[in-house]
């Protein structure tokens, strides 16, 4: 009898996990070489490096109820210096991967891992994008990782700011 009750409890627990997992919404997708961040209130499209294109920049930004959105031509997405050399979204990047991320406040999104195409084994960057339910914001953080044997000095950070006109629906 105990064996059957354990099976039932395990079955109910598994069903509960499936239900909970169904409620967690993923706020990004990858379409070709585009990362699309979208939580229903804000949409941001970021061009990822690919074979024929090594730039990393935001190309489209839109807010809910906006009539047209913003086509962005020159938002470089980031800029910094490593060992006195300038790096930005127009530098030659190689895409290492895109991973799911989340935080304890309910945000979820994507982590984009990049490394310089012509300076491999020096450093990688992880650009983390988090979106939140019912908030028209995209939180961005950049993490630098030294993957080489020599020390690096990172300075002069700029992560790009996209501003729109938004009014609360409440």
Image (cartoon, helix red, strand yellow):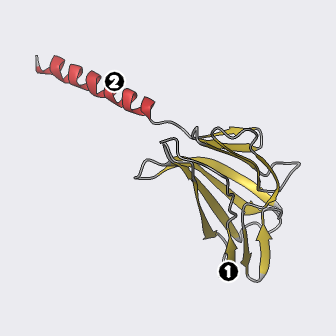
Residue 50 circle label: none
Mark 2 or 1, nearer chain start: 2
Q: Is residue 138 above or below residue 67?
A: below
- Residue located beneath label 1 in the image: 155
Q: Is residue 79 left or right of residue 53?
A: left
Q: Evaluate whether residue 161 shows in this view.
A: yes
The residue depicted at 66 percent of the width and 64 percent of the height is: 125
Cα gap from disc 2 to disc 1, whole angstroms: 49 Å
Q: Is residue 120 left or right of residue 104?
A: right
In this orientation, which residue lies closer to the viewer: 1 or 161? Answer: 161
Residue 15 circle label: 2
The residue depicted at 68 percent of the width and 69 percent of the height is: 123
The residue depicted at 11 percent of the width and 21 percent of the height is: 2
Q: Is residue 12 left or right of residue 108?
A: left
Q: Position of residue 98 (x, y in %)?
A: 64, 48
Element at label 2: helix
Residue extending farthest to the right is 52
In this orientation, which residue lies closer to the viewer: 89 or 100? Answer: 89
The residue depicted at 66 percent of the width and 77 percent of the height is: 149
Front of the two marks 2 and 1: 1
């Amino acid at each position: 009898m105990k064996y059957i009750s354990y099976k039932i409890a395990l079955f109910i627990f598994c069903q509960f996990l499936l239900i909970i997992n169904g409620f967690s919404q993923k706020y990004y997708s990858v379409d070709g070489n585009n990362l699309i961040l979208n939580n229903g209130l804000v949409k941001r499209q970021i061009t990822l490096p690919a074979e024929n294109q090594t730039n990393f920049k935001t190309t489209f930004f839109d807010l809910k109820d906006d009539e047209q959105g913003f086509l962005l031509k020159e938002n470089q997405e980031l800029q910094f210096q490593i060992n006195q050399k300038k790096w930005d979204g127009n530098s030659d990047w190689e895409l290492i991967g895109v991973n799911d991320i989340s935080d304890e406040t309910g945000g979820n999104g994507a982590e984009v891992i990049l490394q310089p195409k012509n300076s491999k084994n020096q450093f990688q960057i992880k650009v983390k994008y988090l979106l939140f339910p019912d908030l028209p914001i995209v939180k961005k953080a950049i993490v630098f990782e030294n993957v080489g044997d020599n020390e690096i000095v990172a300075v002069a950070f700029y992560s790009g700011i996209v501003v729109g006109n938004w009014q609360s629906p409440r």
